[in-house]
Image (tube, rainbow, N blue to C red):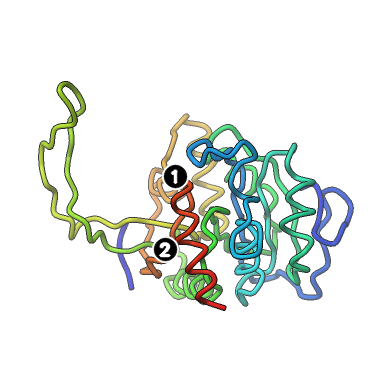
Amino acid sequence: MQTRAGCCCADGAACGDVADSGASSSGRACAVIVAGGVGRRFGNPGGKLLVPCAGRPLMSWALAAFDAAASVGHIVVVCRSEVRDEMLARAIEPLHLATSLTFADAGAERQDSTISGLAAVPATCDVVAVHDAARPLIEPETIDAAVAELRAAGPEVAGVVCGQPAIDTLKLVEMGEPGTRFTGTPDRARYWTVQTPQVFWTAELHRACEKVRAGGYLGTDDASLVEHAGGTVLGFEAPRTNIKVTVPEDLPLVEALLRERR
């Protein structure tokens, strides 16, 4: 990475239709909100995305941010089919979104969910912003700035990924007995920690997904798929507060930060 600063719609439209938001998605980005995880590390039998957080289900915060982003013309929520109705009733309909929204089915792996969501992106959206539903602290200004960064970079750049330069000391490790052994200390100036959204030209992400599907490559994030396909990805420095809720102890911090914004 190079560095540089459906099945149902929100308005109750028929399965597979795009709800009328009152504005065209042409020339705007489509947000693909990946909400397909089961939250094993969080430890809640129903997952974490509908857990209450600062007065809303956790995933509602990210949806509201993308709805408020001027650069976004459509939203695709990627989730398991068995939770779709509950997500719609609890996390989506109460928001009264102005942006059209459709669903796509989650896959077995994260990249399978991305591929599924990408298939639901309207043809009029030339940019796609893939985001983890469990990152509720994303702000509309960050979304718009990342999309603008990609557009300014032009077609020679395939994507822009939100993140920050690493600030912690990093260690190379070797696992074994009697425990984890440090084997080296790399120069952290050469490392970033990355978040979402990860923003790509829609055609470039399509190309990358086709290549990894044909070759059996399994990436760790969406940017790794594009990198594997030979695309150039830039880092976009975003707020460090855009953390992901992974384990229960993340929730109080996220909730405090959300309440502080009000």
Q: Could you say which disc has been placed on residue 165 in the image?
A: none
Q: Secondary structure at mark 2?
A: strand
Q: Residue at x 16, y 21 (%)?
A: 177
Q: Earlier in the sequence, mark 2 or mark 1?
A: 2
Q: Is residue 156 left or right of residue 56?
A: left
Figure check: 246 above or below 163: above
Q: Are marks 2 and 1 in contact (CB under 8 Å)?
A: no
Horizontally, residue 63 falls left or right of residue 83, namely left
Query: Three-letter amino acid code at disc 1?
Result: Leu
Q: Nearer the viewer, residue 79 or 5?
A: 79
Mark sitting on residue 162: 2
Judged from this view, the residue extending furthest toward the left is: 184
The relative height of residue 159 versus residue 116 in the rendered view (above or below) is below
> Where residue 44 sits in the image (x, y, percent)?
58, 39
For disc 1, the neighbor class at 10 Å (few under 14, some 14 to 19, many from 20) is: many
Mark 2 or 1: in front is 2
Q: Residue at point 58% right, 46% down?
A: 48
User: Residue at 49% of width from left, 67% of height from top?
Assistant: 256
Residue type of the residue flagged with mark 2 = Cys
Distance CA(mark 2)–CA(mark 1): 16 Å
Task: Say which quadrant the C terminus sits in.
Answer: bottom right
Q: Is residue 98 above or below residue 244?
A: below
Give the side of residue 217 with respect to residue 258, left or right: left
Image: 128 above or below 216: below
State left or right for residue 166 relative to residue 137.
left
Which residue, given by chain and number where applicable, does mark 1 sit on?
A: 225
| Number of other residues with Cα within 10 Å of mark 2, as a class: few under 14, some 14 to 19, many 20 or more | many
Residue under the point 13% across and 54% down:
187
Residue 169 drawn at (x, y percent): 17, 53
